[in-house]
Image: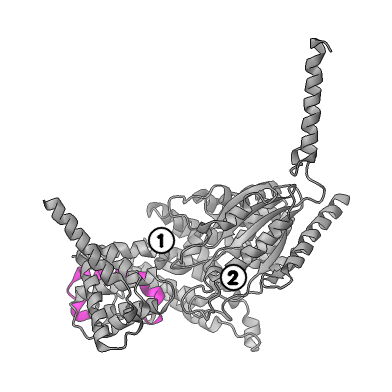
Amino acid sequence: MTRLLRRLSGAGLGLILLFVGSAPAAWRDPGTAATRQAAASDLDRLLTEYRHGDAGAALAALAGWDPARLEAAISAGRDRDRAPWDAAALALLHSEAAARRDADAGRAASLTEARRLMTDVACHPDAAGADAALRRVCRDWYVQMVGEYFDLYRTDDRFSPGDPLVLMARAAYAERRMGPVEERNHTGEDLIGLTPTSHGRFNTYADDAVHLLRKALDADPSLVEARVRLGHVLYQLDRTGDARAELADAIARARDAERPDQAYLAHLFLARIAEEAGRADEALAAYDAAIAVAPHHPAASLAAARLRAGAGDLATAVTLAAAPLTSPGDDGFGDLDPWTLYPYGSWGSDRPAALARLREAVRR
Amino acid sequence: MTRRHAIPTLTLAAAALGAAVLLASDTPVFARGPAADAVSVVFVLDTSASVQQGRLERGHRVAPAPENFDQLVSAARLVLGELRPDDEAALVTFADRISLVAPFAAGGGTVGQGMASAALRQPPRAFPASVVHDAVIAAAGLVAARGRPAHVLLLSDGVDTSSWASQPEAINAARAFGVEVDFVTVPRTYETYDDVDSVYPVDVDPLAKKTGGRVLSARDGRLATKIRDLVEGWRAAALSRTAR
């Protein structure tokens, strides 16, 4: 009997989600107040389900909403008083839904509302100040989402500003905004105004990044990822001696920290520094060291192939170039090359998975 | 005929028949080997978000162009149609990673099937990435190992966001491997650098031009003719190489 009731209640829940998750034609014209209020109520039901029921189904339903319906729900729900944990949960629901959407108006609306809920409600000092668990949620959400919002990069005061993970996430965002190294090398053209490029921006963000990373390492010297990033930013600033020292230090610490992905990146960056200085043998040795850490990832293998081919060793070069194609694998830290993820900082990891982990904290 | 003579005679007749069948076959590779103008080509197909969805990420100035991918595939099929059974082809795809979808095989091999795979049409990723330069190096190494005139046919909008190799490094690698890169393009879907993601436009033509290859537009009304010329050019180069 109990089993039957459970089945029936499951079917009922399914029907409710089907209804709440569907997009009736009315939502395509969300002009009336009644329509907006109905959308807001539907969103609240999804929030309840997200926090206390089948979170995956609630998330899938919201991610499938028509953007107009979503905007209507957000607009009508904005004036509702929400407790800090409710606000954090709704922000997370929006963040997860945004990560599943294409770049449409719904994604933008969800991201904007998530930021508002976190900044103005959940992570407001009056709310999160005494609640250590909520502060952790705020910090982890910030680290995961800072790449989405420029204004979050500028103001971290509500998101554990001295926390080394927050500092590192901000630094990664600053580095991303520096622009590629090639742009920096157009300095001469810029000075006479021929080529408008980014390096005014480059210097500003580079200084920011160095400052933030040094603060992060002061707070936690064992933070290998921050040290690798510092080495890479210093290299881009042409401070290659300092860069090499930081990268060598990072390699030494990566083993204890169990971060082979960071050791791989540090070897790659050392190789690049050596290559640009014309020390091909040293570069090749550094690429070989990176391959030893991660034989299935392409960046190091292809770079070594390129250098070997250039030196006339075609047989070895062919083997190296084919390696990522013929034996792909994840080397124990994901199947994407760490260099591919590097520009995205802490949020470059699998965002849906990271947000799903964070979700558990708001399901209380 | 005695029984003693019958077995060798039948064996000879069977061998002659077998040889005749092989010589008349459409796939004479094993009988005669490839002709002097046979070519090896790796199709390097861009499956990244910028090609499939006409955007890279939020913040870009983009125009949706989902037809780009289909146009690249159509261009690839035109090239496949020009290949002979004694040519060989492979298919490599790339977006945020590089994959060997169809290994080298005679004629078009399974390249056509590979391009039709639904798996190539990826769902949008939170951080779409594209590794054009690295894919060119991988493909160049792959085809260089074949020991005959080697071509990389890059089918892409040329937007590279995440390669470790720079464009000059990819060019130098292709040249060192002795591989020509031909490039079938579609228009890029943003006009200038992206202020948020630091994706900058780069002139991609040098990848082809500095390796001896050609640049074709997938939207060219005379694409079929130009592709026929392209493959004939490959064969002429192969013959002249053999003559040297």
Q: Residue at x 56, y 74 (%)?
A: B65
User: Farthest right residue?
Assistant: B243
Query: In the image shown, does A58 or A134 lie closer to the viewer?
Result: A58
The CA distance from mark 1 to mark 2 is 41 Å
Q: Based on the displayed image, in which of its 4 quarters is residue B190 positioned? A: bottom right
Using the image, tell me which numbered label, if any, was put on residue A127: none
What range is drawn magenta here?
A124-151
Chain where mark 1 sits: A
Query: Measured from the top left, where is residue A169 in percent x and y?
Result: 39, 71
Q: Is residue A345 left or right of residue B39?
A: left
Q: Overall secondary structure of the magenta stretch?
A: helix
Mark 2 neighbour class, 10 Å CA radius: few under 14, some 14 to 19, many 20 or more: many
Q: Given the image, what chain letter belongs to the residue carrying mark 2?
A: B
Identity, as a three-letter code, of the amino acid under mark 1: Val
Q: Is residue A303 above or below residue B68?
A: above
Q: Quadrant of the C terminus of chain A?
A: bottom left
For badge 2, the amino acid type reads: Asn
B187 or A306: nearer the viewer: B187
Q: Residue A61 at x, y = what percent?
A: 31, 68
Q: Residue at x 42, y 73 (%)?
A: A171
For disc 2, the marked residue is B68
Residue A13 at x, y percent in the picture = 21, 63
Q: Residue furthest toward the front? A: B1
B80 vs A220: above or below: above
Residue A224 is labelled as 1
